[in-house]
Amino acid sequence: MKPKALVAGNWKMNGLASSQAELEALTHYLKDGAKADCDVLICPPFTLLSVFANAASDDIAIGAQDCHTQTSGAHTGDISAEMIKDAGAAFVIVGHSERRADHGESSVLVQEKAKAVHAQGLQAIVCVGETESDRDSGNTLTVVLGQVEASIPDEVTPENTVVAYEPVWAIGTGRTPTVEDVAEVHTAIREALVQRFGDAGNEFRILYGGSVKPSNARELMSADNVNGALVGGASLKASDFNGIIDAYRNR
């Protein structure tokens, strides 16, 4: 059976308390509109986690954008998965390309963060993706599958882990790969998961991210082995995010 889709919004370093209006607009849309055949997730900055967790409807899950590997300790400025759980979140993004690039996070560290997320009973969204130079040199699958292998712990299940493929060159640039490009990478990820985890590999959700917007969501979501989207800028405005969710209505 095909995994149920997940449409996740990554707000990155955006959002103030006044942003709750966008969450409320999304809540009303999901409640009043035709039911979408997907799960919906919002990952705001840490400052809004508890606010959003308390305000969100049952149709919207709340997640964090990162966590530390340790439960507590002398780690000034960091947030543990335990704290994230305490704030009411259910998911944590780990290994986003901006963390890998801006903070030098390795796949080994990403795996440790995923383990910390699982230890708290939360779901990890493990991000993988190639740079423009990787793609231009024909190394896309080598890089992506290497990240999949090194970033995902051995003990994962489809219930506690989601994989998100985001070509780095397509994030926030307006450039998007073709549906065929996306299908090729997602199918390779699926095959790697099946090879590693057996039949359970078919049950993992694999999200696509990278300049997803209402105008291209339906086409991208139709690609083979795409089970939803990890959305950046378009998730900051309820009407745009709704347009992406619409890809999972009336299909």
Image (tube, rainbow, N blue to C red):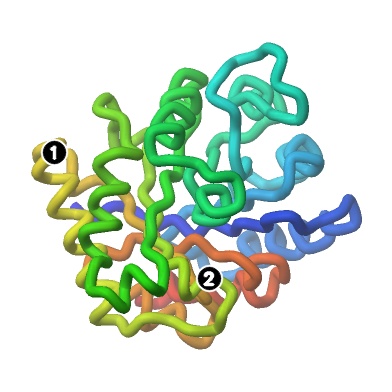
Name the one closer to the observer, 235 or 98. Answer: 98
**Quadrant into which the C terminus falls:** bottom left
Mark 2: secondary structure: loop
x and y, in percent, of residue 164 in the image: 40, 55
Total numbered labels = 2
Q: Gap in Å between the C-alphas at discs 2 and 1? A: 28 Å
Direction from residue 78 to residue 168 in the image, left or right: left
Determine the image quadrant of residue 178: bottom left
Name the residue beneath numbered marker 2.
171
Q: Position of residue 67 (x, y in %)?
A: 60, 32
Compared to residue 1, the image places residue 137 above or below, namely: below
Disc 2 residue crowd, few under 14, some 14–19, many 20+, Cα 10 Å: some
Q: Is residue 60 above or below residue 25?
A: above
Which amino acid is tagged 1? Answer: Arg
Numbered mark located on residue 209 in the image: none
Q: Residues within 10 Å of mark 1 (few under 14, many from 20)?
A: few
Residue at coordinates 31% horizontally, 65% vertically from top-left? 226
Q: Residue at x 59, y 28 (%)?
A: 68
Furthest-top residue in this view: 73
Front one among 160 and 26 = 160
Q: Secondary structure at mark 1?
A: helix
